[in-house]
Amino acid sequence: MSRVFKRQIRVGVFRTQLEPKIFSRVEIGEIIEGLHIQFSVEKSLDRSPNPSTLRIDNLNEQSRRLVARSPVAAIVEAGYDGQLQRVCQGDVRWSQSRRVGSDWQTEIQLADGGRAFALARVNATYGAGTPIAVGVRDALVQMGIDPPASLLKIPGLQRRLSAGTATNGNARDELTELLRPLNLSWSIQDGRVVILGEEDTLPNDVQIISQDTGMIDSPEQGKPDKDGKPPTWTVKSILRPDLLPGQRVEVRSQVVEGRFRIEAVKHEGDNMTGDFATELEVKAIVPAAASGDSSSILRGVQSGAAAVLVPGSKP
């Protein structure tokens, strides 16, 4: 597909506020397109900011100066034949421009929510009986995230503190400590917070990955994280910016079929000399009764039987 349709990349660079908030843009600095642009984007459920790298040839002097300033952020969109979707966004962590022959080459590193992760702080006191959701909300607000009502209704977050406590430190650390007793973890995906349990999935619609939808080659099996757990699989596809860590996908191939949770995503693209592609690391969603028997897991995956979990639900 990528050899037939025109590949396009557009980068918007924004000046942002001094406050360490998630993508608090002030104004558009530059829209960069029509140049040779390469991108590599990594997304996972880890709380550390998702990293991205851009390489742009012959960026003009004004744009080179802009990306070298701080604080600056960027949005990267890519797609085929003008149908562009957001691939990533983030704060410019580092940039460098150099001459290579008669050309300029600029490398830019982005971090999704990088400034908020590094700098946002929270200072609050909570009495006994305060819902954990209140502390989670306050930490997110300090990071510049407006938490949706659905997020704060996750059952675990309605638990109440057994004793009074005070928070004073990095918002990222306070958020982690509030969620740890509930076996919940958090990450930032394109400026939005995702809070999930180890086997929870996002409530998005299940997306199909098959030859008909652009799957490349056959899925490859990896090793399970622990004995008795389902193995991970690597699935490659044409560029799919809509796929996020924590999302459910249905894989249809001659090697394996079934429903999986995306654990990690990698997008790579080159609009002039290469292809666009998405690589997924996925793990099977299986019935709890089969979790200790690898042969049962494989049968469950191949038959498409799976327990779909969403935040706060039970298998």
Image (cartoon, helix red, strand yellow):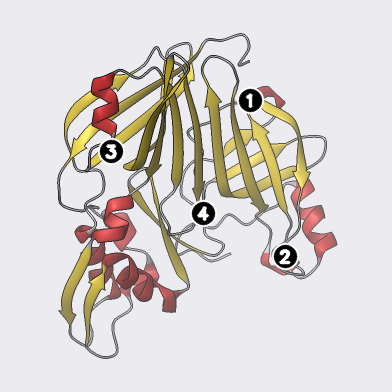
Report the side of 254 relative to 1 (left or right): right
Q: Amino acid at mark 1?
A: Thr
> Mark 2 — residue?
229
Quadrant for the C terminus in the image = bottom right
Whichever of labels 1 and 3 marks the residue nearer the N terminus, that label is 3
Q: Nearer the viewer, mark 3 or mark 4?
A: 3
Density class for disc 3 (Cα within 10 Å; few <14, some 14-19, many ≥20) is many
SS class of the residue under badge 3? strand
Quadrant for the N terminus in the image = top right
Question: Where does the image place residue 21, in percent across and percent down from the top left?
Answer: 22, 51
Q: Nearer the viewer, mark 2 or mark 3?
A: 3
SS class of the residue under badge 2? loop
Question: Where does the image place residue 193, in percent across and percent down from the top left?
Answer: 35, 53
> Mark 4 — residue?
201
Whichever of labels 3 and 4 marks the residue nearer the N terminus, that label is 3
Please tell me which residue is depicted at 62% across the width and 38% down the height of the picture.
Answer: 279
Q: Amino acid at mark 2?
A: Lys
Gap in angstroms between the C-alphas marked 2 and 4: 17 Å
Q: Can you name the residue that lies furthest to the bottom here?
A: 163
